Amino acid sequence: MIRRVWREDFRIIGYYTGLVTIGVGLLMLVPMVTSLVFREWASALDFAISVALTLLVGYVLALVSRTKSTPGLTHAMVIAAGSWLVAMVLSGVPYMLSGHMASFLDTCFDTMSGYTTTGMYLMQDLDHISQGLNMWRHLLTYVGGQGIVVLALTFLIGSTGGAFKIMVGEGKEEKLEPNVRHIAVLIWRISLIYLGVGTVVLGVVAIANGIKPYLAFFHGAYIFMSAWSTGGFAPYSQNMLYYHSSAMEIASMVFFILGSFNFALHYAVWTGNRREILRNVEIVSFTITVLTTFSLVCLALMQRGVYPNAVALFRRGFFQLISGHTTTGQSNIYARTFVREWGPLGMLATTIAMAIGASAASTGGGFKGLRVGIIVKGIVTDVRKLLSPERAVVMGHYHHIRDKVLSDSVVKSAAVIVVLYVLIYVVGTVVGMAYGYPMVDALFESVSAGSNTGLSCGIVQASMPTLMKIVYMFEMWMGRLEFLSVFTLFGFIATSFRSMRVRKTAV
Amino acid sequence: MDERARMKRVVSLRRGLLGMLTEVAFVGSLIGLGFLISWLFFMGR
Amino acid sequence: MKRLCAVLIIVVLTVLIVTPVLASAGQPPVLSTTELVENSYKWDGKTVSFKGEVLQDLMVREDGTWMNLSDGNNTAMGVFVPKGVAMPAISRTEDYRTVGDVVFITGVFHRVCAQHEGETDIHATSVTIVTPGSTKANPIHLDRVVWFVVLAGLLGLVMWLYYRKPGRGTEH
């Protein structure tokens, strides 16, 4: 159902994009203050410039398109995709001013990676940036992760299962439901509580491991934000290896696994429905796929004799695998170690885990456990139908907060999205191979980008071919917004050209 | 705050805390299962 | 007499030439992080040398100290200095406002250190400071101050326009 585009639509989109941009500008005050606290004067000035510029763009947009109309679903999706791009460019200003970026494209890559909670980076000399810039990088992933969750739950009706149907099957226009906003507030509350708890816990662990107290809580905040948002950034190029601490890794692991859970699940568990954590299809799916892919990883690592004992196998193998499966991307091994030590099977098992990804309506990426669960159950139901007498009515069910019917359209919607993900993974792999990278490496890196994981086997670096940077950026963007928002944006742009031409000839 | 509102708040705080603990316990068990699997692989060697 | 001098000169020259050659043959090679990670099996368990700038956090633990040494663009290696090894006083570690001490270490490289649960690290047997740290300039550029002032001014103007008439939105 393609609509005619009117001026009012532009105003709605422009206005709300402007508001989001103003939000981004205000957010930049946090790293600016951080730099002031650490007496990083030049960095603070860079952020001051960025704040002023971003707020300027935001206010101009809002001023020019000011409107009282409320956005519909289509508008919301265009705003989501469009403001993503605006935020990507403006958030890069502090990066460019720092002198640590080799090009504007690299900057966009890094901010796109941050907002999509991927975690790959092209920044030069990460080990020598200011605290302010580190704060900004990690804050980007936290906000990016939260933003998606709030978007997913605020603009959709009811729980995620119903929303799939609306978005893929019907294309109706729905208005915001005030009662879903109440859920969004609780979601923020949960995230902020964990932010507090997480920063303190990780900060204390950091102090116990020898980091000075005044720095420890910044590390705590950075690692928490990176973990909860399943982003995967860390303040230094060695990622989690910098800390040489199993306590840091385990604490971070707990937070990033939690962060990968569906926020509707958090809501349920935090409001008395604790049973849900054992009954939810996504948790069941996640547990099964984690343990299976991890067993595969162990098999691969044991076959190659990579680790000398169970503790090392667990600490490196499990951390990497679960970091991949939750699409976090934090790492306690060097990137090239995947290729030079883990080998193809280990990499493939990790790739599968990344592809499957985290839960829906979470900060994670990938197919999502919900879809995997739905598709598997769909197959089982189809088999049952085949084996039952013709007259029998066979209906599948799945449990996601509530018991739900496994209708054909639900299974179809899930399958369509999975196919789209596979498509972008394959495109990224083919491009990588075209540039000469081995298939296993190219697949690993492409899936890492498309599922917003961020684990790297060494391909992503500033010297990477430009086309590959662009392809990975597209993958990150599409993967994060789950295609529909991006398609709506393009559809909107295409329709507006067409209707503008129609109006011109009519006059 | 009157008595009923206070009770509601206490209940919701308690639920929230128990919820957090449940989640963390679940995740801890998952990590524990992971360790068990690594240990089993070495035992089986 | 002449023959004696000639022999003496030859002996001295030989010693001067051969000794460094022999000495360097026993010297552990100075490797980069990239080389060590790329060929981790080759260097596993070998004694190597490494040089890098000390990154911000020196972590003192029960059985030794961890240092992270940065030896290039986005490459750094974890170096563990066990308690028994003499550790010189590190005057400066990397910071926005300081360049850290550049340190030269010799030690055993581990592909997967058993003591440290599979870490890729070097256990140092000797640590020396090559270049002491210094302060970094990080100057504030005047043109950036100007940019800020200009942008802030424009922003003030636009914000004033925006907040001036609240009901303006609905007409075209």
Image (tube, coloured by chain):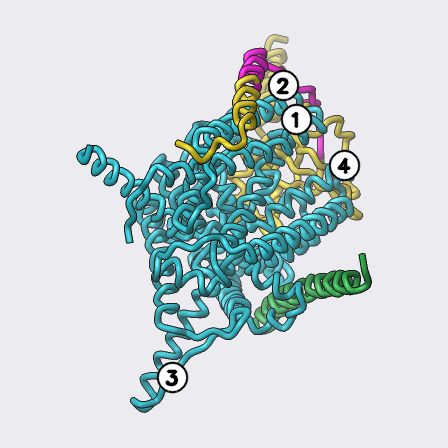
Chain colours: A cyan, B green, C yellow
Residue carrying label 3: A394
Query: Is residue A386 inside the magenta stretch?
Result: no
Toward the viewer: A427 or B11? B11
> Which residue, as the protein is rendered here, is positioned at the far top?
C2
| Residue at the (48%, 59%) spot, across then down | A157
Query: Is residue C151 inside the magenta stretch?
Result: yes
Q: What element carries label 2?
A: loop
Mark 1 touches mark 2? (CB < 8 Å) = yes
Residue C96, disc: 1
Residue carrying label 4: A214
Toward the viewer: A497 or A42? A497
Density class for disc 3 (Cα within 10 Å; few <14, some 14-19, many ≥20) is some
Give me the chain letter of mark 3.
A
Give me the chain letter of mark 2.
C
Give, as a single range, the part of the protein colored magenta. Answer: C127-152
Q: Say which label, 1 or 2, has the lower sequence index.
A: 1
Mark 3 touches mark 2? (CB < 8 Å) = no
